[in-house]
Image: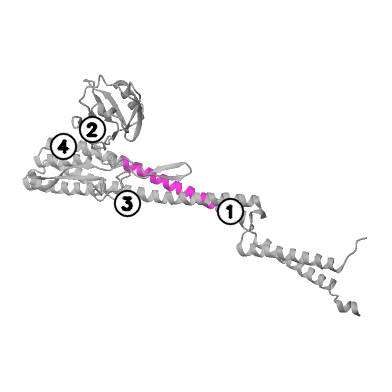
Amino acid sequence: MNRVTNQMINNTMSHNLQRHQAEMDRIQESLATGKNVRMPRDNPTATTNQMLYLSRMSEVDQYLSNINESKSKLDEVDTALQSTMRIFQRLRVLTVQGANGIYTSFELKEAAATEINELLEEIVNIANTKGATGRSIFGGYQTGTEDQPNPFVPIYQTLTAGNQGNAMIGVEYRGNIGGMKREVSKGEYMDVNIPGNWVFWATNQILTSNRDASNYSSATNQSIKIDGKEISISAGDNLDLLIDKINNAGLSVRATKGGRNNLIFETTTPHQIWLEDVGSGSVLKDVGLLNTNFPDPPNNIDPTVTVGGMSIFEMAIQLRDDLVRGDQELVGGRDLGLIDIALENILKHAAAVGARENRVDELAKRTEYDKSNISELLAKSEGIDYAETIMNFKWLESIHQYALAIGAKTIRQTLMDFLR
């Protein structure tokens, strides 16, 4: 037989009351916070899931931010391209009029030259457009410097023909070919810019070296870069192997050997070729394409190289000069054809940007759905059922009150009760 004392009864009652109070405190905190887990030990499985959901939610929020930024940058590019196309439509009208002999008098030629010069200025301004962050949208990675804030630098000269005065005679690209990418989904990246030496180029470019490279052989293992893609050249590679490696690199550039065993590069889509010898390599210098005194592209082409192809700036300048001279045949033939090629190239880039914008819109919808789905899973994992929780609290409160009432009757005896 076990001996039951008043102390044992008191201890048991106190333990039960404290247990009730602790459980009521837990339920009360759940009601106040709306969450069913206070500490990981309360529900390790739910805690793990909640951490995964919160981590995924953070990722999705960042992807949404990247998507919105991508949309904004693509809108900036699209706006610039649309403006450029409108200018070229006007240039085409001027070209057709010039081909039909409208600009015959000196005053009309002067007026045409003045308008084309103004349109040229506007195209350069568009090419140097800066986005919301202050970075040139067509300058690649270039952010600008105090000495050279813009990627496109116009060159001026005083022209007496057509009374043009200080007019533009050329434009140099000082940006680079860096592509700005944004991660719009897990492992999924998107280009949000187009380098200016692709957008503002009218025709395929041809670079013809005038150096006989029949005896060329690479002295060491070295590398070259064409349009930003690195190509490894092995020691002993001759001109034929060099050409094969370039043509198998998946570039929009085709290499061929000329009749004098010289190297010829031609683009397959309109853009300015970007050539670099990597590190201490000298492959492109040795075959006569690069200038050893100017290592930075794109203005590092050796002066002996024959350069073919035109930027849209050079094309507009050529049109202006032909109109001022009154050469209707060139205006209606060569210049009109170049205008159409330039328009086609700009339209191609505008279509590509539009396709990316549509893709971004779909990504935004998909990511918003993912966020909604994760939010629902997180709410189910960490949230409480208020009706059930309140019912449990009321039930526990009633049990606690019963325990207090029974305890009061059980231990109500005092010392005076035993002294009677």
Residue at image position (14%, 39%) is 99
Q: Is residue 112 visible?
A: no
The numbered disc on residue 131 is 3
Please report the residue visible at 80 percent of the width from the left and 66 percent of the height from the top: 11
**Quadrant, the C terminus:** bottom right
Question: Distance from label 4 to label 2 (Cα)?
Answer: 41 Å
On screen, residue 222 above or below 31: above
Q: Which residue is mark 2?
A: 292
> What is the magenta range?
348-372
Q: Residues within 10 Å of mark 4 (few under 14, many from 20)?
A: some
Residue 327 in picture, x, y percent from top left: 10, 37
- The tag on residue 378 is 1
The kind of residue tagged 3 is Gly
Q: CA separation, marks 3 and 1?
A: 38 Å
Q: Earlier in the sequence, mark 3 or mark 1?
A: 3
- Give the CA distance from mark 3 to mark 4: 37 Å
